[in-house]
Image (spheres, helix red, strand yellow):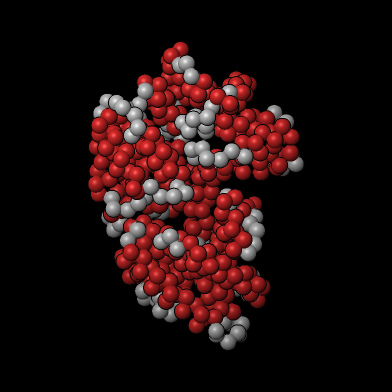
Amino acid sequence: MMLKQAVDLFWRFKFQEAETILTSFSDTNVAFAFHYAEVAFMKAVITEDKEDAKVADGRINACMKLARKQKKESEKPDTIPSILLAKIIQGEVSLLDAALKFRLQRQLTGVYTFRKSWKYFEAAISYRKKLDDNHPMAKEIDTYLQTSVGFFHFIIGVVPKEFQWLAEGVGFKGNRDLGIEEMKRAISLGGVKAVMSQFHFIWIYSFFFEDFAEGEKYINEILSRIPDAVPALYLAGYVYRKQGKLDDAERVFAAASKNSTEVKQVQRFGDYEQGYCSYLKLDYENAIKTLTRFLNDSPGESFRVYASFQLAMSYELTNQPALAAEQMKKLLPWVRKNYDYDEFAERKAKRYLTLKGGLSAFDKHFHVCMLHYEACRWEETLKAVTEIEPTIHADEDRARLMWLKGAVLQKQNKLNEAKILFQDVVSLEKAVGGKDSSFVIPHSLCGLGEILIAEKQWDAALRTLKKSKSYSGYDFSQLLGWRIKKDIENLKKAKAGKL
């Protein structure tokens, strides 16, 4: 099947070969036209290049025009499948268009197009009743429909509070569980679009649920069929890194880079990820070399700010404060609003630039503790915390160490010990006012809430999680907000005996 071959080439980032196949029918077949537009969309998102965005925009418009034409066919039994597919593709291509507009910071037109996309899918859902389930095209068409509608239901179901206006603009409420069911059905149908549902699940389980084992399952499903699928390799690296499997992460990031000869930006992203792994390994010299190469070669915004912060900290931790300050200063004009990692780096950079001679001994040591923690080296984290504990005098510093120790013990399932530490941190709330320490209160409350769920103290857990949710303005608040939302939903399911 030519379309399936082209889509497989797309996931392998063999874009030129995919386009050669897709252009054969992109003027007459809406599915070919959609995937032809999808290739250009993927390029534009990765490269952040205006010319690539123009190409994507042109193909999106051409696909929409073809879909409108096909939708106007006179309705007969033999034309119902093509009319239905045209309706679905209108939704699909509008979704690409909306994502492209958001990427180009055109939020208002992006919201409008996002809403239009859902309206197209609504029409397709209604029209689907006209198609016989035994029709030869039914499974393929349902794969497209279930993948996209499932994604919509899930994504609106997890919209953070500050983006509720977007959900209202779309005009419907999300349903996370229904979305998951729909995408699982798409995978079971096995059509061309099924791989996209698998990619959605990698994101859902790895980024939202932080269930890396489940995310890895979908990665392996894709790689078993398409071993050089670049996005799957890249996401595998992320999943491995989040689990502390840094050697495995470096291996698959290198493989993703090797297979991305047509998209040089992905190779640069691979450089960044290799540098990130070196940084977590405390191999600062290699991190400096690799992150410097990434920043010199990469013209785009992705990772630039946080990579600069990591490079600056690598200088700081190798006793080169002048170079650290230079890099901290350099990142400030690049900061993007509402990006947690950018805003964290900005705050840290501004604070660093007020210091003379670099960070205090405690702050240096605490940063190393956090690198151990991020790399899932639990025993090394506890050892590093124990080494510095006798030297602290300020309650804010004590609160940071207690929170970190509690977080590690929670990961090790030593819940009673973790609970005591989290409670001790919360008791210091009035003493914890600095920006470097304010995060420990909501994080400790969240940890407490999770332990109370494990203890089946439902009401106390809900009160604690809601209190954690009430805080704002601390580092990575959006990420913790997602975790709290997930915890509250799990609490309700567990209380109802559904978990």
377 above or below 188? above
Work out whether residue 15 can be spotted.
no
138 relative to 498 in the view: left or right:
left
Q: How many marks?
A: 0
Measured as percent of width and height from the top left, residue 411 is found at: 54, 28
* Residue located 33% across and 70% down the image: 20
* Residue located 49% across and 67% down the image: 109
* Residue located 37% across and 23% down the image: 360
207 above or below 34? above
220 above or below 129? above
Q: Please tell me which residue lies in front, 117 or 350.
A: 350
Asked where in the image residue 344 lies, by quadrant, the reply is: top left
* Residue located 36% across and 65% down the image: 53
Q: Please tell me which residue lies in front, 231 or 363.
A: 363
Measured as percent of width and height from the top left, residue 127 is found at: 63, 74
Which residue is outermost to the bottom? 74
The N terminus is located in which quarter?
bottom left
497 relative to 30 in the view: left or right:
right
Measured as percent of width and height from the top left, residue 131 is found at: 63, 75
Measured as percent of width and height from the top left, residue 412 is found at: 55, 25
57 relative to 131 in the view: left or right:
left
The C terminus is located in which quarter?
top right
Asked where in the image residue 429 lies, by quadrant, the reply is: top right
Work out whether residue 263 can be spotted.
yes
Which residue is outermost to the top? 390
492 above or below 222? above
